[in-house]
Image (cartoon, rainbow, N blue to C red):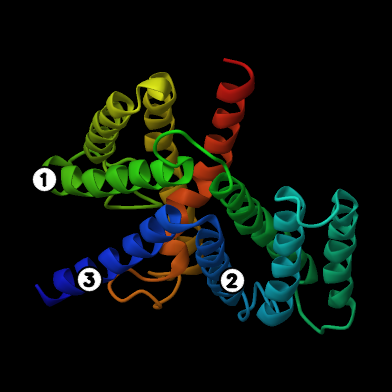
C-alpha cells in the first residue's frame, strides 16, 4: 500500500510537470523537456560506465550529447543558422577520438554506446521539442501523444494484472502479456476516439495516432527492458521514487516520438 501511494504521488507530479508547461507556454515546455533530457542522458551513460564489457566516461559522453541536442534544437527552432549542423559530425568524431587516450578494454563498445545514446535520446527529444513549437487548433500535438502513451501504459498494466495469461516475450519482460497489450490498445483507441470527437477537424489524425502509438509504446517498453536485462538491472535509476529512473518513464515516448513525428509530416503534407 505504501508503495502504491508513493507511485501515485510520483506519477501525479511527473504527469503534472508535463501537462502544465505544455498548456502554459512553449518556453516552459522546452525547459522541462531539456531538463528531462539532461537527466536522461546522464542516467543512460552511467549505465555503461563500469564493468568488463563497457567503460564509458559518462561526463564526457553526456556533455557531447547535450551539445548535439542543443545544436539540433537551435537549428530546428530557427534560433541558430542551419550550417551549425555541420558541427555535429565533428562532435561525434571528437567523442571517438577521446578513446585513443582512454585505457579501456573495449573501445569499440564504448564508441557504439556513445552513438546509441545519441540515436536513442537526442533524436527523440529533439523531435519532441519541435512538436512543442507546433501550433494546433485543438489539443497540443505533444500533449496528445503523451496522453495516449499514458493511457496505453496504464490500461495495459491493469489488463495484464487482471486477465493476462499469455506472455509476449518472456525472456525480455516476464510480466508483459498479450492480453495486457490488447487491453491497452482498446482503451487507447477509445481515448483517441474521444479526443477526435471533441477535435472534429482532426478526427482521422487522432484515430490513426492512437492505432500507431499503442503498439509502439509496447515496443519501446520492451526495448528498454531488453537493455536492462542485458545489463542485469531492474531500473535505469532511482530519481523517481516508486517508478525508477527517467528512462523508465520515457521508454515508450522515446520509441513513439520518431514515428509520431513522421505520421504528423505525412498527415500535414500528403493527406
Q: Residue 162 has which mark? A: 1
Task: Specify the quadrant of the image occupied by residue 236.
Answer: bottom left
The residue wearing badge 2 is 38
Task: Specify the quadrant of the image occupied by residue 169.
Answer: top left
Task: Specify the quadrant of the image occupied by residue 93.
Answer: bottom right
Residue appearing at x 26%, y 64% in the figure:
12
Q: Residue 9 has which mark? A: 3
Front residue of 235/123: it is: 123
Q: Is residue 91 left or right of residue 71?
A: right
Q: Earlier in the sequence, mark 3 or mark 1?
A: 3
- The answer to whether any part of residue 169 appears in the image is no
Q: Is residue 140 left or right of residue 174?
A: right
Compared to residue 110, the image places residue 166 above or below, namely above
Q: Position of residue 112 (x, y in %)?
A: 73, 61
Compared to residue 267, the image places residue 49 above or below, namely below
Report, in whole angstroms, how far the alpha carbon at label 3 lies from the one at label 1: 23 Å
Most extreme residue toward the top is 271
Q: Position of residue 31 (x, y in %)?
A: 55, 66
Mark 2 surroundings: few (<14), some (14-19) or many (≥20) residues within 10 A: some
Amino acid at each position: 500500500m505504501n508503495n502504491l501511494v508513493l507511485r501515485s504521488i510520483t506519477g501525479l507530479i511527473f504527469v503534472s510537470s508535463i501537462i502544465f508547461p505544455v498548456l502554459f507556454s512553449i518556453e516552459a515546455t522546452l525547459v522541462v523537456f531539456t531538463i528531462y533530457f539532461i537527466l536522461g542522458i546522464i542516467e543512460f551513460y552511467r549505465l555503461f560506465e563500469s564493468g568488463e564489457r563497457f567503460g564509458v566516461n559518462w561526463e564526457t559522453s553526456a556533455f557531447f550529447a547535450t551539445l548535439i541536442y542543443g545544436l539540433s534544437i537551435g537549428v530546428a527552432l530557427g534560433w541558430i543558422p542551419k550550417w551549425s549542423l555541420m558541427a555535429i559530425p565533428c562532435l561525434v568524431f571528437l567523442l571517438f577520438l577521446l578513446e585513443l587516450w582512454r585505457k579501456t578494454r573495449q573501445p569499440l563498445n564504448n564508441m557504439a554506446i556513445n552513438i546509441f545514446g545519441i540515436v536513442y535520446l537526442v533524436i527523440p527529444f529533439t523531435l519532441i521539442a519541435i512538436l512543442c513549437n507546433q501550433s494546433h487548433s485543438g489539443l497540443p500535438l505533444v500533449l496528445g501523444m503523451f496522453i495516449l502513451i499514458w493511457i496505453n501504459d496504464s490500461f495495459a498494466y491493469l489488463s495484464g494484472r487482471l486477465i493476462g495469461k499469455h506472455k509476449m516475450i518472456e525472456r525480455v519482460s516476464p510480466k508483459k502479456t498479450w492480453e495486457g497489450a490488447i487491453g491497452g490498445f482498446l482503451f487507447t483507441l477509445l481515448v483517441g476516439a474521444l479526443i477526435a470527437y471533441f477535435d472534429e477537424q482532426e478526427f482521422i489524425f487522432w484515430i490513426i495516432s492512437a492505432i500507431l502509438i499503442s503498439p509502439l509504446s509496447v515496443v519501446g517498453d520492451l526495448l528498454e527492458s531488453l537493455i536492462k536485462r542485458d545489463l542485469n538491472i531492474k531500473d535505469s535509476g532511482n530519481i523517481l521514487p516508486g517508478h525508477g529512473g527517467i528512462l523508465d518513464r520515457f521508454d515508450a515516448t522515446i520509441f513513439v516520438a520518431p514515428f509520431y513525428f513522421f505520421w504528423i509530416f505525412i498527415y500535414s503534407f500528403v493527406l
